[in-house]
Image: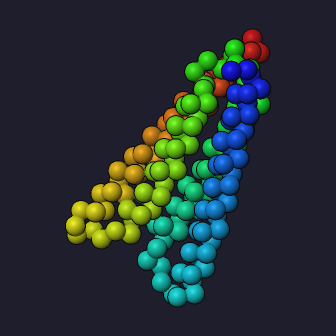
Amino acid sequence: MSGTAVGEVFRRIARRYFRVALFYLALGLLLGAGMLWFGNDNFQFLHSHMLLVGTGLFAAYGAGLWWIAGRSDASLLRGVTPALATAQFTLANVGLPGMLAGSVLPVGLGLDRIGVLFGFIEAAAGVLFAMLLARALKAAGARRA
């Protein structure tokens, strides 16, 4: 795959992240406004994680992948593949909704452990992103040397 094609794949995933971040921003703001309206703050975990992870972290993922796309000389980005970026996107977008859903499940039946499982999936997405970005930064450093 040529550097241009690789770059376009990373840009496409970055755009998806930006769209998802905007979705979570709107959803988190609406939930926050609803909590204020009804005077009920039982969904603070849901609200804060929609905004922090769904908006902030997903936008950072998109920015990082956009940066990688700008440096997508296929010969220099060994180990930074579109397949890994796609896997990272999938993990992140499975982990967060599962974590949010698990946070509202009843505690007594052990169903709240589902949120923990999906939290680990979200953490795996973060570690995979860190690995992708570290490899891209190393390749960018090698290019300058």
Picture residue at 42% right of the left edge, 57% below the top: 98
Asked if one can make out residue 130 in the rendered structure from this viewpoint, the answer is no
| Camera sees residue 39 | yes
Q: Quadrant of residue 143?
A: top right
Left of 25 or right of it: where is 113? left
**Residue 142 position in % (x across, y down):** 70, 14
Task: Identify the residue at image location x=33%, y=57%.
Answer: 114
In this view, the residue farthest toward the bottom is 38
Q: At which x and y percent is residue 136?
A: 65, 25
Q: Position of residue 70 (x, y in %)?
A: 77, 31
- The quarter of the picture where the C terminus appears is top right
Residue 43 or 94: which is nearer the viewer?
94
Residue at the (69%, 51%) spot, across then down: 18
Residue sitting nearer the eye, 29 or 17: 17
Residue drawn at (38%, 69%), measured in percent from left and top? 104
Name the spot of residue 2 as percent of width and height, x first.
73, 20
